[in-house]
Image (cartoon, grey):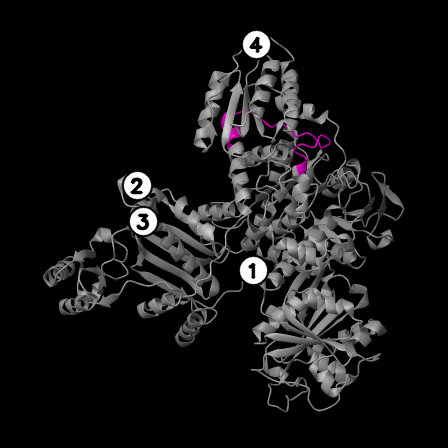
């Protein structure tokens, strides 16, 4: 595929036009050296097969790399690139392809190590297809990918990045000329999701791509991101061969302990021990030992690194040069130490590993576990491989990981996989969510997080994952005000409660302790989701039943009166009562309470079997319901319930592994994109496996089908030592099930004809330009007139206000506005402080106005200090506050609450992520505790909530359309029985900060 200059000058670059010729172009375009190197274009990306590559601009220093790269490209690929046999590049070619002005001519390379594996370049052209300069907004683009790296998604990643560069430089369209036989390159363009035109001219295919992002291009991009990042984690969890680097000759030590655990766990692949003090041919723990990875002489997929931090770089180089795919670095001495030396060592580790295309778990990691029968990998410090199960567990702390593994084991809950990422310098919770999203072995995701490196992306991935399986999160270090040492994350300015609310909006089950994490996890992994909040309670203790009843009311559930079976109830009585409750259509879940029998041994196992029998017998009777057991001093009941479950035969479920699932067996780009656009379309009745909506996601349907499939493994009945814990876990399941049903219809972002987006953008650009707000500026506040103009372009009208520097000016203003009026101060120290007496309302005559003016100035100060204004009176209603702000960690957040000190003191404010949908707006209005004041509390007139919701949506659109708006505050917005009046507003602008979840996909930079 040829670029514009190649068509004009020939493949060797001869002729008179190239923009990259030293000294500048003949048409006056800038010389290359006039433009600084754009280092913000550099990015690490994960490719389709899970490996990594670095994308960066091509410079004049890359001449030798370009020649070496071209020599390794096949003749066929060269023919496709230049439309003619072209065995080697001439000196003029090399000069032109390595000298760019970074504006009209740009070249990017994908590199692994120090070598090019692919290149892309664009040349700006005019309407005639000739080389041009700005303001021409079209460019011709051309790719070349080394044959050994074709099929890895390199060209697709390069297209995303070169398109973002082009948009930054004012280019709106790409043109490409491709030979019809070059189907792979045609597919790269057609699958990208951009609006395009296609024609056939002179024996070649001519493609035109509009570079404005579309819903489909974003869906394609995110589907590719999910596939690549999931694959990179899968390669770490399911390797075919493992080398433990740093395994000592004597027992003990981290390396030798991990080697022993890998062997004892029954890893199904090949295991090697690596220690430079060992000779080739030696053995440790029955596996072959070698002095280096290079000496192994066979492929190694995963290396477990347990050597001192100063030796890690040579180990990484040894692994990278011999094709190791990933690293788990257990070594400490990095950023967790808190010093600059450790932070720099951690940055260097990530850069070095990525240069070889490897991903890292750690450093300072506890390890990884995969319990699949065809993997059985325990590459961690946990002494035993956990039982296989349906829970995926991720922690950022080794100590918490140990505690969680032990607690889940005691509760009889098995794991599908476990990752303890330590400093999570590379692989993070976001990557693991990408993997577990479509992992058929994982039904429930448990996360212990101490920091969020990319909260906006986390919320997006969590929402998509929660639509098909529960995601339970406990957040550590909530109140420390900073991230733990070793965690490189943006600092959020919004309160922890707000972050929690936003995570719940995304469907995350947010809990406060690791105990609650386990409690919720064992219930969700072992029981179906409840269809509603109605709870039946039965047991042999009236007191325990009443505690469960009270706990249900506290959690917002709807309990039935407890059924007291009396202390003389037998296990058969429990079985019959539970079977009746499960068959009763008036309840959605069952809480069983039990106390021990006096003087009778062996009843615990009998009770567990009886409860299991009742649950098994209910499957054919109708929709499955969750059952939880509350017991007092019945040691072993949880184990007995688990044992009763495990006696049922369970067929082996297929598990995709890195060895058994090559990239070509994964879903196609088109199907991935289609699924990505339906991320929020979750099954509505998740407790009913036959629900047809579950078929919207293949995995969700497979998971749901187990609810009544007699061949499916039985579900564990969770047991709790306290009623409050059991009911709290059940309540989380109820709320999650409700969210999941609602997620099938997430609402829409309405379009309004009265919005003038270009006019608002022009105003914002003018203000930022005239006020000199550079990238480092703290921003500028709009004047009252500018605020009114900006809001007006989005259909938000401010109540008319006129300045009143003196009593005569106040009277003149009132005459213009019409009585009655309000007189208020606007001084910063008095704004929104009615308790200080800075507001006078319902002034119906000139005399009242003059009297109020005199009282105001006498009590509070001179007019020049108070800055009084006169405003037309608004209809009576409820005062509210609407705010939107850009948080560096969470993104744009829309907030709503009632005005007044009481709401501020109680923190009675609701939050939603921007852009808000009509459903979000309705929930915002109704989710604050003082919401009854809006709906006719104590006989008052209900206010116009539809108008209030529309105002919220308009503010959301304003902030979403213009990232330069860093804050908006409408205070107060008075909601009357008919209409909303905005009495005050403030807007602040700043140059938009780089976002972490928009634009082309990239890994966090180091």
Q: CA distance from mark 3 to mark 1?
A: 40 Å
Q: Earlier in the sequence, mark 4 or mark 3?
A: 4
- Figure quadrant of residue 73: bottom right
Q: Main secondary structure of the magenta part?
A: loop
Q: CA distance from mark 2 to mark 1?
A: 44 Å
Q: Magenta residues?
A: 705-728
Q: Quadrant of the C terminus?
A: bottom right
- Figure quadrant of residue 184: bottom right
Q: CA distance from mark 3 to mark 2?
A: 10 Å
Foreground residue among 581 and 480: 581
Residue 777, x across and y down, in percent? 44, 68
- Figure quadrant of residue 149: bottom right
Residue 634, x across and y down, in percent? 59, 18
Residue with the most extreme left position = 847
Q: Earlier in the sequence, mark 1 or mark 4?
A: 4
Foreground residue among 812 and 346: 812
Asked if the residues shown at circle 1 and circle 4 are in contact, with their CB atoms under 8 angstroms apart, the answer is: no
**Mark 2 crowdedness (10 Å alpha carbons): few <14, some 14-19, many ≥20:** few
Q: Which residue is mark 4?
A: 598
Q: Earlier in the sequence, mark 3 or mark 2?
A: 2
Q: Earlier in the sequence, mark 2 or mark 1?
A: 2
**Mark 1 crowdedness (10 Å alpha carbons): few <14, some 14-19, many ≥20:** many
Q: CA distance from mark 4 to mark 3?
A: 61 Å
The answer to whether residue 620 is left or right of residue 789 is: right
Q: Residue at x 69, y 24 (%)?
A: 643
Q: Which residue is mark 1?
A: 996
**Mark 3 crowdedness (10 Å alpha carbons): few <14, some 14-19, many ≥20:** many
Q: Which residue is mark 2?
A: 937
Q: Quadrant of the N terminus?
A: bottom right
Q: Which mark is residue 943?
A: 3
Q: Earlier in the sequence, mark 2 or mark 4?
A: 4
Task: Classify 317 as above or below 177.
Answer: above
């Amino acid at each position: 595929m040829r670029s514009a200059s190649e068509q004009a000058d020939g493949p060797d670059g001869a002729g008179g036009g190239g923009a990259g010729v030293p000294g500048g172009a003949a048409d006056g375009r800038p010389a290359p050296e006039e433009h600084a190197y754009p280092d913000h274009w550099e990015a690490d990306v994960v490719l389709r097969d899970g490996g990594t590559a670095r994308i960066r601009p091509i410079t004049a220093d890359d001449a030798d790399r370009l020649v070496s790269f071209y020599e390794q490209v096949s003749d066929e690929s060269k023919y496709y690139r230049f439309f003619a046999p072209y065995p080697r590049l001439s000196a003029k070619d090399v000069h032109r392809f390595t000298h760019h002005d970074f504006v009209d001519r740009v070249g990017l390379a994908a590199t692994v190590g120090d070598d090019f594996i692919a290149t892309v370049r664009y040349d700006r052209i005019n309407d005639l297809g000739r080389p041009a300069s700005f303001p021409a907004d079209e460019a011709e683009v051309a790719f070349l990918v080394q044959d050994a790296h074709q099929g890895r998604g390199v060209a697709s990643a390069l297209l995303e990045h070169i398109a973002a560069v082009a948009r930054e430089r004012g280019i709106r369209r790409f043109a490409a000329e491709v030979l019809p036989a070059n189907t792979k390159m045609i597919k790269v363009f057609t699958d990208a999701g951009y609006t395009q035109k296609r024609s056939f001219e002179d024996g070649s295919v001519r493609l035109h791509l509009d570079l404005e992002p579309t819903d489909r291009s974003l869906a394609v991009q995110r589907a590719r991101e999910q596939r690549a990042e999931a694959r990179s984690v899968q390669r770490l969890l399911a390797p075919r061969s493992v080398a433990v680097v740093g395994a000592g000759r004597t027992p003990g030590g981290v390396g030798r302990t991990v080697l022993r655990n890998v062997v004892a766990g029954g890893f199904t692949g090949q295991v090697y021990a690596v220690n430079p003090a060992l000779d080739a041919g030696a053995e440790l723990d029955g596996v072959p030992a070698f002095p280096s990875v290079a000496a192994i002489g066979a492929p190694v997929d995963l290396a477990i690194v347990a050597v001192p931090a100063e030796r890690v770089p040579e180990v990484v180089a040894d692994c990278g040069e011999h094709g190791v795919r990933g690293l788990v670095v257990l070594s400490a001495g990095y950023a967790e130490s808190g010093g600059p030396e450790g932070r720099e060592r951690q940055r260097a580790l990530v850069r070095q590993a990525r240069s070889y295309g490897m991903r890292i778990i750690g450093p300072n990691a506890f390890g990884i576990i995969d319990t699949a029968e065809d993997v059985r990998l325990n590459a961690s410090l946990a002494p035993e491989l956990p039982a296989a199960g349906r829970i995926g567990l991720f922690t950022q702390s080794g100590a918490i990981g140990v505690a969680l593994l032990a607690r889940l084991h005691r509760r009889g809950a098995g794991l599908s996989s476990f990752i303890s990422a330590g400093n999570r310098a590379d692989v993070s919770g976001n990557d693991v969510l990408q993997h577990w999203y479509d992992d058929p072995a994982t039904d429930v995701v448990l996360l212990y997080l101490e920091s969020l490196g990319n909260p906006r992306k986390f919320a997006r991935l969590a929402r998509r994952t929660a639509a098909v399986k529960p995601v339970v999160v406990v957040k550590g270090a909530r109140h420390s005000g900073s991230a733990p040492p070793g965690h490189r994350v943006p600092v959020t300015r919004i309160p922890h409660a707000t972050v929690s609310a936003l995570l719940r909006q995304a469907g995350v089950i947010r809990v406060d302790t690791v105990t609650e994490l386990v409690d919720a996890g064992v219930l969700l992994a072992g029981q179906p989701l409840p269809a509603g909040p109605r709870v039946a309670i039965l047991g042999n203790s009236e007191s325990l039943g009443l505690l469960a009843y009270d706990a249900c009311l506290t959690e917002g559930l709807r309990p039935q009166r407890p059924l007291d079976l009396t202390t003389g109830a037998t296990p058969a009585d429990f079985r019959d009562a539970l079977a009746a409750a499960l068959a009763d259509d008036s309840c959605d879940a069952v809480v069983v309470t039990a106390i021990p029998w006096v003087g009778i041994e062996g009843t615990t196992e009998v009770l567990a079997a009886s409860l299991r029998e009742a649950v098994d017998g209910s499957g054919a009777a109708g929709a499955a319901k969750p059952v939880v057991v509350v017991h007092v001093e019945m040691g072993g009941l949880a184990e007995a319930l688990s044992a009763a479950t495990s006696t049922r035969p369970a067929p082996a479920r297929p598990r995709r592994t890195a060895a058994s699932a090559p990239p070509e067996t994964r879903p196609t780009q088109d199907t991935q994109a289609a699924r990505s656009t339906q991320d929020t379309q979750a099954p509505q009745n998740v407790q009913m496996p036959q629900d047809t909506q579950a078929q919207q996601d293949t995995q969700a349907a497979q998971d749901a089908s187990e609810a009544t499939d007699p061949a499916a493994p039985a579900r564990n009945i969770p047991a709790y030592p306290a009623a409050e814990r059991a009911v709290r876990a059940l309540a989380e399941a109820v709320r999650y099930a409700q969210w999941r049903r609602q997620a099938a219809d997430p609402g829409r972002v309405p379009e309004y004809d009265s919005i003038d987006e270009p006019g608002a953008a022009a105003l914002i650009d003018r203000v930022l330009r005239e006020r000199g707000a550079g990238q480092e500026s703290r921003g500028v506040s709009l004047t009252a007139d500018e605020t009114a103009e900006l809001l007006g372009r989005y259909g938000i009208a401010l109540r008319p206000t006129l300045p009143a520097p003196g009593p005569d000016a106040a009277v003149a203003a009132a005459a213009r506005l019409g009585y009655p009026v309000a007189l208020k101060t606007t001084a910063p120290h008095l704004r929104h402080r009615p308790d200080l007496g800075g507001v006078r309302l319902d002034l119906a005559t000139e005399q009242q106005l003059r009297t109020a003016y005199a009282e105001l100035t006498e009590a509070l100060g001179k007019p020049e200090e108070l800055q009084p204004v006169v405003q037309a009176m608004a209809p009576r209603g409820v005062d509210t506050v609407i705010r939107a702000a850009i948080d560096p960690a969470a993104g744009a957040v829309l907030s709503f609450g009632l005005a007044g000190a009481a709401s501020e003191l109680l923190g009675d404010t609701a939050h939603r992520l921007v852009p808000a949908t009509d459903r979000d707006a309705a929930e915002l209005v109704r989710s604050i505790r003082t919401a009854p004041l809006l709906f006719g509390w104590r006989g008052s007139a209900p206010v116009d909530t539809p108008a209030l919701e529309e105002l919220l949506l308009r503010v959301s659109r304003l902030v979403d359309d213009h990232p330069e708006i860093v804050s908006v505050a409408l205070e107060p917005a008075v909601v009357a029985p008919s209409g909303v009046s905005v009495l005050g507003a403030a807007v602040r602008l700043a140059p938009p900060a780089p976002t972490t979840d928009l634009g082309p996909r990239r890994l966090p930079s180091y």
